[in-house]
Amino acid sequence: MLLKERERLVKLDSLTVLDYIKTSIEILMQMKNEDDKETSKEGARSYRFPQNGENGGAASEFSSTF
């Protein structure tokens, strides 16, 4: 599928390809904005901080002495 898309894009004028990229980015930004609005209505964030007891990172054999 990607090869077909690449072959199609190679045949197009460079300004047309740039416009295609610009439009794709605008669509993605609109989707992100809509998602942000939905999560703000729910009172949630699109990211999550570690909860109590979670370190938020990879497991480690080292422990803190603090």
Image: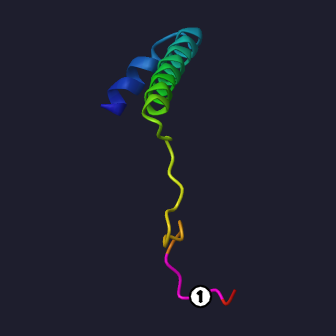
Residue at 53% across, 88% down: 61
Residue at 58% across, 88% down: 62
Residue 55: quarter of image:
bottom right
With respect to residue 53, does 31 lie above or below? above
Residue neighbourhood size for the residue with mark 1, other residues' Cα within 10 Å, grouped as few (<14), some (14–19), many (≥20):
few
Residue 41: quarter of image:
top left
Instruction: Give the camera-side residue of 65 and 15.
Output: 65
Which residue is identified by label 1?
Answer: 63
Residue at 53% across, 66% down: 56
Instruction: Give the camera-side residue of 33 and 26.
Output: 33
With respect to residue 46, does 57 lie above or below? below
With respect to residue 18, does 40 lie above or below? below
Name the spot of residue 33 as percent of width and height, x first. 51, 24
Q: Is residue 60 magenta?
A: yes
Residue at 49% across, 63% down: 51
Q: Decide whether the magenta segment is chiefly helix, strand or loop.
A: loop
Check the picture and name the quadrant holding the N terminus. top left
Name the spot of residue 27 as percent of width and height, x first. 47, 18
Check the picture and name the quadrant holding the C terminus. bottom right
Instruction: Give the camera-side residue of 40 and 31.
Output: 40
Q: Is residue 9 magenta?
A: no
Label 1 element class: loop
Instruction: Give the camera-side residue of 65 and 1.
Output: 65
Q: Is residue 26 left or right of residue 31?
A: right
Name the spot of residue 65 as percent of width and height, x first. 67, 90
What amino acid is found at the position of numbered circle 1 in the picture? Ser
User: How many numbered circles are shown?
Assistant: 1
Q: Which residues are magenta?
A: 59-64
| Residue sitting farthest toward the left | 1
